[in-house]
């Protein structure tokens, strides 16, 4: 059974790399599905008057930010249980927007290749699955 996956958006607070010790609260939502919102217990950070130049944009940070898609629900309600992004594939496509190739494993054991788009200045991560590697058990 071929899974229909839409664009999944993940709203994240990108204040720096997770490896620097900062932890960001994560809110995820499947595009077109406003009831599919998942939030952490931490409150969202207060808006900052700091310039955006403090945001981490190294390839490692872009890959780490994209891996925060873990826990996001797809339209078929399967959950991303593992997301591995390859920092060597990170590239800036327009100012403040980066893409990185990732592989996502879902709760139904399906595995998908795709492209994560990290919108650093907006604090968003978008997921576009490109190809099924395996379809798993179908739920």
Image (cartoon, grey):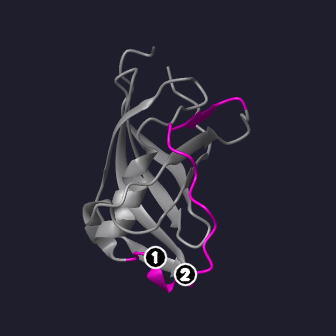
Which residue is depicted at the point 45% across and 14% down? 139
**Image quadrant assignment for residue 90:** bottom left
Depth check, front residue: 108 or 26: 26
14 sits left or right of 27 in the view: left
Q: Is residue 111 above or below residue 85?
A: above
Q: Which residue is mark 2?
A: 52
Foreground residue among 37 and 51: 51
Residue pointed to by mark 1: 55
Residue 50 x %, y %: 56, 81
Q: Label for residue 28?
A: none
Q: Is residue 36 left or right of residue 135?
A: right
For this rendering, which residue is in front, 37 or 73? 37
Mark 2 crowdedness (10 Å alpha carbons): few <14, some 14-19, many ≥20: few
Q: What is the x, y in percent for residue 124? A: 57, 59
Q: Is residue 8 magenta?
A: no
Inter-mark Cα distance, 2 to 1: 6 Å
Question: Tags 2 and 1 in contact by the CB under 8 Å rule?
Answer: yes
* Residue 64 image-quadrant placement: bottom left
Q: Looking at the image, can residue 34 be seen?
A: yes
Which residue does the image show at 50% across and 38% down from the upper left? 40
Between residue 115 and residue 40, name the one nearer to us. 40
Q: Position of residue 92 (x, y in %)?
A: 46, 78
The residue sitting at 52% across, 50% down in the picture is 127
Q: Magenta stretch: give its range.
A: 35-57
Badge 1: residue crowd in 10 Å (few <14, some 14–19, many ≥20): some
Whether residue 137 is situated above or below residue 42 in the rendered picture: above
Mark 1: which secondary structure? Answer: loop
Query: Where, by quadrant of the figure, is residue 21 drawn?
Result: bottom left
Residue 38 in the image, given as x and y percentages of width and height: 57, 34
Which SS class for mark 2? helix
């Amino acid at each position: 059974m071929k899974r229909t996956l839409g664009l999944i958006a993940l709203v994240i607070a990108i204040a720096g790399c997770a490896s620097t010790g900062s932890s960001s609260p994560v809110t995820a939502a499947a595009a077109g599905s406003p009831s599919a919102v998942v939030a952490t217990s931490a409150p969202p950070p207060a808006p900052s008057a700091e310039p955006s130049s403090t945001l981490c944009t190294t390839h490692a940070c872009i890959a780490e930010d994209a891996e925060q898609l873990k826990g996001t629900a797809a339209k078929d309600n399967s959950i991303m249980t593992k997301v591995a992004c390859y920092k060597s594939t990170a590239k800036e496509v327009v100012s403040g927007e980066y893409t990185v190739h990732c592989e996502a494993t879902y709760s139904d054991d399906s595995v998908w290749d795709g492209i994560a788009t990290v919108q650093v200045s907006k604090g968003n991560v978008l997921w576009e699955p490109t190809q099924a590697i395996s379809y798993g058990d179908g739920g």
